[in-house]
Image: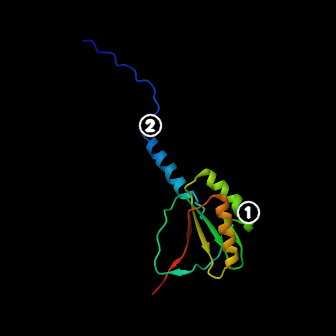
Amino acid sequence: MRFAKKKEDTAGIPTGSMADIAFLLIFFFMVTTVFRAETGLDIKLPEAEEGHKLPSRGIAHIYVSAVGLISIDDNQMRVNQVSIEMAKKMQIDRSTIVSLRIDKSAKYDIVGDIFDQLSEAGALRVSLATDRLRG
C-alpha cells in the first residue's frame, strides 16, 4: 500500500490579527486627535427676535470687541488690514460668506470702516450675527 505524499505548506504571513491592529490604530488616532476650535474675541452679541442659520462651511468670521479689537481667524489686526486678509480669502473662494460678530457696545465708526474694507476686498456676502432674544 502506497501513501500519497503530502504537499509541504509554504510559509505565509499570518493575517488574522491585521484587522485588530487596524482598528486599534483607528481608535488611537480618534482618541488622541484634537480639533482646534476658533475662539475669537469675548463679545456680547446683540439680540434679535428672528434670524437665519448659516451653513457651517464657507464662512469667514470677523470678531469686533467692545473696545475695537478686530480678529479674523484668531489673528488680531487693525481696520486697514481687514481688506488685505479678506481679499486673500476671496481669491480662494468667491462664494465666502462673511459673518460679522460685533459686540453690541462696539462703536459704529469701526463697523462702518469694516464694511468699507469688505467692499474694497470684494466680500459682498455679509451676515450680522445675533443672539436669539429670550422671552
Q: Which residue is mark 1?
A: 81
Residue located at (46% from left, 26% from top): 11
Percent coordinates x, y for residue 4 in the rendering: 30, 15
Residue 46 lies in quadrant: bottom right
Q: Is residue 89 depicted above or below 129 in this figure?
A: above
Q: Quadrant of the C terminus?
A: bottom left
SS at mark 1 in the image: helix
Q: Amino acid at mark 1?
A: Gln
Residue 78 left/right relative to 27:
right
Residue 63 lies in quadrant: bottom right
Residue located at (52% from left, 55% from top): 30
Confirm or deny contact between disc 1 and disc 2 (CB under 8 A): no
Residue 55 left/right relative to 67:
left
Residue 64 lies in quadrant: bottom right
Percent coordinates x, y for residue 26 in the rendering: 50, 50
Observer able to see residue 73: no
Q: Amino acid at mark 2?
A: Thr
Percent coordinates x, y for residue 67 in the rendering: 72, 79
Residues packed near mark 1 inside 10 Å, few (<14), some (14 to 19) or many (20 plus): few
Mark 1 vs mark 2: which is more N-terminal? 2
The mark found on residue 15 in the picture is 2
Q: How many numbered marks have been drawn onto this rendered protein structure?
A: 2
Disc 1 and disc 2: Cα gap in Å?
57 Å
Give the colour scheme of this rendering. rainbow
Residue 115 left/right relative to 95:
right
Q: Residue furthest bottom?
A: 135
Q: Quadrant of the N terminus?
A: top left
Q: Nearer the viewer, residue 26 or 44?
A: 44
> Which mark is nearer the camera, 1 or 2?
1
Percent coordinates x, y for residue 42 in the rendering: 64, 76
Residue located at (67% from left, 54% from top): 88
Q: Is residue 102 depicted above or below 60 in this figure?
A: below
